[in-house]
Image (cartoon, rainbow, N blue to C red):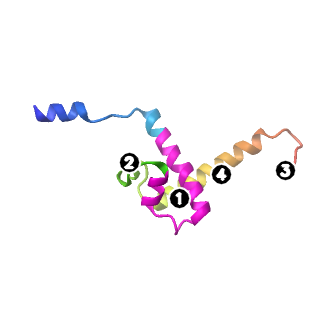
Amino acid sequence: MAGEWMEECVARYDKEHKQATRQRILETSGRRFKQSGIDGSGVATLMADAGLTNGAFYAHFTSKDDLVANVVADQLRTQAETFRALPPGRVR
């Protein structure tokens, strides 16, 4: 009976919520890396910036190196989208 109750109380998040949380971690980590550097940004600080617990980190990334690689990929993807949206012939 206690096990059944516990299963009902455990919050299950849908894929959209998990993806939004992951994106929030990527964006806040990107800002922190630019501000404090990668070595100056611990997981605890990054997660606090995102408003999440340290334990939530490992639901999204296997390590800090994994996070850094994903932040870089996300930033490059954002830059590529920005450049693709520019009108032809426009130089910035």
Question: Of label 1 and label 4, which has the lower sequence position?
Answer: 1
- Secondary element type, mark 3: loop
Residue at position x 62%, y 61% in the image: 34
Residue at position x 53%, y 59% in the image: 68
- Secondary element type, mark 4: helix
Question: In this image, 65 relative to 88: left or right?
Answer: left
> Which residue position is annotated with label 3?
92
The tag on residue 76 is: 4
Q: Quick check: marks 4 and 2 in contact, CB under 8 Å?
A: no
Q: Quick check: marks 2 and 3 in contact, CB under 8 Å?
A: no
What residue span does the magenta drawing correspond to?
A: 20-49
Q: Residue flagged by tag 4: what amino acid is it?
A: Leu
Residue located farthest toward the left when viewing the structure as drawn: 1
Q: CA distance from mark 2 to mark 1?
A: 15 Å
The tag on residue 68 is: 1
Q: Is residue 22 magenta?
A: yes
Question: Of label 4 and label 3, which has the lower sequence position?
Answer: 4
**Position of 88 relative to 56 (above/below):** above
Residue at position x 50%, y 64% in the image: 41
Are there few (<14), some (14-19), or many (20+) residues within 10 Å of tag 4?
few
Total number of numbered discs in the rendering = 4
Are there few (<14), some (14-19), or many (20+) residues within 10 Å of tag 1?
some
Q: CA distance from mark 1 to mark 4?
A: 12 Å
Q: CA distance from mark 4 to mark 3?
A: 17 Å
Whole-percent x, y for residue 83 in the image? 76, 45
Residue located farthest toward the bottom when viewing the structure as drawn: 39
> Which residue position is annotated with label 2?
59
Whole-percent x, y for residue 53 in the image? 38, 51
Q: Quadrant of the N terminus?
A: top left
Question: Of label 3 and label 1, which has the lower sequence position?
Answer: 1
